[in-house]
Image (cartoon, helix red, strand yellow):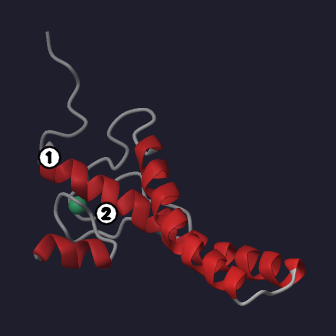
Amino acid sequence: MKRLFALLRQRCPVCLQGPVFRGIFAMHSHCPVCGVKYERETGYFLNSMFIAYTAGFFILVPTAVLLYFLNVSLLVFSTAIILETVIIYPLLFRYARLVWMHGDQVLDPRTAEEQDQPTRM
Ligand SMILES: [Zn+2]
């Protein structure tokens, strides 16, 4: 429940307090509170794209079906879909990454201390 609240408030998946984003699309590289590195490995956020595609599909398809049954013109249909995409894209981008990071933290937990440690032989 605490994690869900942190996810909705767009907070760090490890300490649940530090903000993840510093702009509409710009992310902090590390948590300002606990210092954990958000991008765990190269290409870490690739999986969040699949979450965004899936969520976008389930958001846009009902609109497309509704517009189809309202029998609107192609121009109105295209404009409505493009506008909806532009409006939801920042939210999709952010929450796809957050859902991915929090899900990954639940399945493969890490602490702030074990981050950025050089590999010892
Ligand atoms: Zn943190």
**In the image, the residue with mark 2 has its CB under 8 Å from the nearest atom of ligand 1:** yes
| Residue type highlighted by circle 2 | Pro
Above or below, comparing residue 8 to residue 121 in the picture? below
Instruction: Decide which of 111, 89 is in the foreground and name it.
Output: 89
Instruction: Decide which of 96, 31 is in the foreground and name it.
Output: 96
Which residue is located at x 35 percent, y 53 percent? 30
Residue that mark 1 sits on: 107
Which residue is located at x 11 percent, y 48 percent? 111
Question: Quadrant of residue 44 in the image?
Answer: top left
Pinpoint residue 46: horizontal percent, then vertical percent.
Answer: 46, 42
Residue that mark 2 sits on: 32
121 lies left or right of 35: left
User: CA separation, marks 1 and 2?
Assistant: 23 Å
| Residue type highlighted by circle 1 | Leu
Ligand 1: give its quadrant.
bottom left
Q: Secondary structure at mark 1?
A: helix
